[in-house]
Image: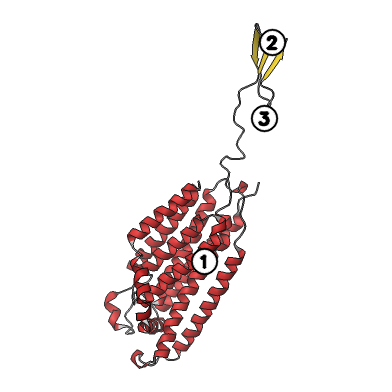
Amino acid sequence: MRGWPIGLAAWLLLAAVASAAGFVEVWRFFVEGLHGQQLDYVAISGNSIGRTRIEGVVSNTLNGISVLSLTVATGVIGFIALARRRVALAVGAVLLIGGANLTTQLLKALIYRPDLGVDPDRVAAGNSLPSGHTTIAASVAVAFVLVLPARARPAGALVAAGFAALAGVATLSAGWHRPSDAVAALLIVGAWAALAGLFIVVAQRRHGSVEYGEPSTYMTIFLAVISLGLLAGAAAAMYVTNEVLAEAVDDLSRGRLFAAYAGGALGIAGTAGLMVASVLATAHRVVPQVVPDDDPSAPPPEREPPTVRLGGDDDATTHRLAVPPDGTDPEQTIRLN
């Protein structure tokens, strides 16, 4: 019997703390800092370039993300987990979705965005970090990855990363959110995914006797490498944008504006992919392949003692014998003439 997975629990706790710390840094730099607000402003100002070509995709994506769709998706995910007889997984998936979205709404109401004179047209809108639409899409996508069977999980993770990235970029393209809003939402989902995984591990009290499936190594590496490449592109775009912050946005060329917008989109997509990759890296242990129905440490069920018949067929005396302490099954009837 394996012991409790202390290393796994520690890793999940570390992942939750790292995601929370990342969120705090994004908040401080892009909301409270002048430099971050300027970078966000240039990026969202470039969303008008080529908008007509992707307007249909953006509208369909955002219109499909609502409280109703969140409720339906949560029910479906819970049903899949229960159909697989994974109660802890069902509760953990609902905890992930509910916790992430509740946290986003609370933070959006509590965080104050100072007016530093960067984006006067959006001052009246107040704070927009983190993005609610991105949180809904990403939390549902990650929970979906967790409840899938092991064989379908790699493909599901690829779809989940793409969907979360699409939702975040769509909010930027529509002008609803700045890039940092979507990135912050993805970090919140990452933190809650780690906490939900920790809950599932702890809730499975017979974790020591489970059977782990094969890790999704190739897909995890693929998502991680692609995501790091996207984040590198985002860093390069931020460097290029940083060189023109002294100029007014109206004076920037289309190329400069597009570079800033593309950098924001790459940052969102890279964060989404890296977050899903981190979940996929431990999913085979958080959600084991086989969880026994019975506790292996429990005593064997009581059996009816065997019968001993003394006498002939017509005149027999029966006596009950105790079940052997080793749990073996003796013959149920012993006939002595």
Callout 2, which amino acid?
Answer: Leu
Q: Which residue is tagged 1?
A: 158
Which badge, 1 or 3, is on the more N-terminal residue? 1
Residue 116 position in % (x across, y down): 33, 83
Residue 286 position in % (x across, y down): 55, 55
In the visual, does 130 lie left or right of 235? left
Q: Which residue is tagged 2?
A: 310
Q: Residue at x 51, y 81 (%)?
A: 233
In the visual, does 303 lie left or right of 191? right
Q: Residue at x 28, y 82 (%)?
A: 121
In the visual, does 96 lie left or right of 52? right
Q: Residue 41, relative to residue 223: is it above or below?
A: below
Label 3 secondary element: loop
Q: Which residue is tagged 3?
A: 327
Which badge, 2 or 3, is on the more N-terminal residue? 2
Callout 3, which amino acid?
Answer: Gly
Which color scheme is applied?
secondary structure
Label 2 close to label 1 by CB (< 8 Å): no
Q: Residue 143, relative to residue 306: is it above or below?
A: below
Q: Residue at x 35, y 83 (%)?
A: 48
